[in-house]
Image (tube, grey):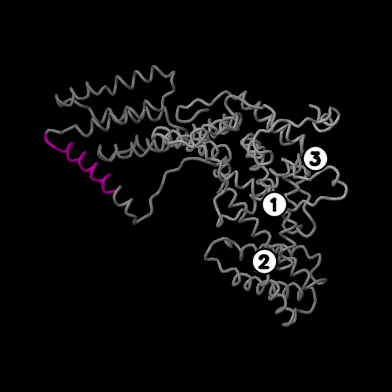
Amino acid sequence: MPLNDEQPPSTSSCEDQGSDAESSLERCDSVTSASDLECSRESFTSDSSSKHCTPSSSPPKTLSLDEVMKSARDLSNLSWAHEITMNPNFHVAKADLPQGSLHKAIRDAMHKAFWDILESELNDDPPVFGQAIRLLEEIREILLSFLNPGANRMRTQIMEVLDLDLIRQQADNDALDIQGLASYIITTMGKLCAPDRDDDIRKLRENTDNIVTLFREIFRVLDLMKMDMVNLTIDNLRLVLHRQGVEYERATFQSILDKTPNALENTTSWIKTTLEELQSTIVTTEQTKNQGKVVPGPFQVLNTALLGILTWDYGKGPLPETWANDENRLQEIQWQLQQCQMVNEVLLIVLSTVGGPIQGVTCLSERLKRMTSVLLDGMHRPNFNLEEALDGVSSQISCEINKSLTERSYPALTPALQATLRGQICSITQKDNPIRTLVEDRVQQYFKMLIFDPKPQLKLEQVPAGLTAIKPELTSLGAKFVSLVNYNKNVYRPFYADIIRKLMFGGSPPTANLPQDAAQKSVPSK
């Protein structure tokens, strides 16, 4: 469903482009030799364009203000659509301003002044209804905004009862029944509100305060009803975006790229860095010397780049533009993963240091895991003292272990062993710590397996040895990350394919003249 009254382009061409780009990336996997390179060249230079979704850019130009504003709207729509799609709990809620803040003080003062003026006018002799009529006009527009397009009878009734010209004539002749209008408004609100607001409507009907307080409460409930309407719209949009979100986001991003040719600058740099790192690690073997230089395949380049997102260093630069809308989700996964890794490292150190007396004691392991997780909670915060926290972890662990050993008639840990345990636990703050390196490498292996496997859901439970203690957390984080990656690839695959083609083949070179049999071997049959 379009946002801001914009119509998304036809989805059929987007689907064609997505499937073409997918075939381009999947034709060549892992390491590509000379003959495979021509396969990649052919698939990446073939004409898989579509009118709406072909990644394209034009030379830099000066943008008009209208074009800048249009790009800003597109970017806003893209962010909203992506958040609605990816976050099932996303809803609009009333913003509560901090107590004592300047913003709240100004807002409260303005509201008080408004309602004081209304009360003063109504208490005049004769009453003045100027402010009240403006309120009724605003209420009428809000009620009309709640109606479905086909609710003509209720629309007509609201316009007749809240006829402003008639209300002004009644006010001029001192015949305006303001209480009667308020009762009609409350009755109409009861017909239009969600079931959750029935109690609010009942309280409005029972309100015995003066008319000013009643109108204040009417506006409070109307604000709640407006939020309900927005959230209902979001829920309806979510159903549509689950079916058409990929095409909508891709088309919207293409619209942004058309107006801002450098909108993929960070993405290009990210993929280029990955390609260069892969090329530097590939060594020509005796088996492939006669076939030519070995190069990474496009599929390998993309998946390796996506894997790198998991450990992105936000201090060195912003995320690629194609991941900008998922920054918060990625950071949350990264923080949770770092905490899980450190918990696992602590438990491995405890098991290797203490050994036999605590092996197989499941209840103790679970207690140590929960306790360590609690003490390391928030370790990603800048003001978190990790060394101090680990020192506390080692002390608590020693107490728990001694308690367990005593209960099972084992001797308690000696002071020397406790000191050794403390030193090893505190040493995992060092990046070259062997336990830390081991755990981080195996976590990377796990996520690499998920990213490179065509059916990652079947591999979620296959946690590498040494990570069993955090298996539930790891599988949960793996599922979240794979979900983000798969959706990202579905949306931006044509753009990634275009970037990789240009980086590997320098634009759109002609297809190499391969022998017929070699060409048939290089290009898989469809």
- Which residue is rendered at x = 27% and y = 33% of the image? 135
At 77% across and 34% down in the image, what residue appears?
A: 39
Circle 3 or circle 2, nearest the eye: 3
Q: Where are the magenta residues, as a range?
A: 108-125
Q: Secondary structure at mark 3?
A: helix
Q: Position of residue 176 (x, y in %)?
A: 20, 26
- Distance between the Cα atoms at labels 1 and 2? 21 Å
Q: Quadrant of the C terminus?
A: top right
Residue 352 in percent (x, y) is at 78, 70
Horizontal relation, residue 26 to residue 313: left or right: right
Q: Residues within 10 Å of mark 2 (few under 14, many from 20)?
A: few
Mark with earlier residue (1, 2): 1
Name the one closer to the observer, 490 or 270.
Answer: 270
Could you tell me if residue 93 is visible in this image? yes
Real-space Cα distance between discs 1 and 3? 19 Å
Residue at label 2? 431
1 is higher (above) or lower (below) than 305 = above
Q: What secondary structure is marked by label 1?
A: helix
Q: Is residue 463 above or below residue 223?
A: below
Q: Position of residue 248 (x, y in %)?
A: 56, 30
| Mark 1 vs mark 2: in front | 1
Q: Which residue is at the far bottom?
A: 415
The picture places residue 423, in percent across and down from the top left corner, at 69, 76
Query: For the point 72% across and 63% down, which residue is it?
Result: 437
Q: Is residue 115 magenta?
A: yes
Give 70 or 412, whichever is nearer the viewer: 70
Q: What is the three-letter code of the residue carrying label 2?
A: Lys
Amino acid type of disc 1? Glu
Residue in the image at 62% along x and 47% along y: 270
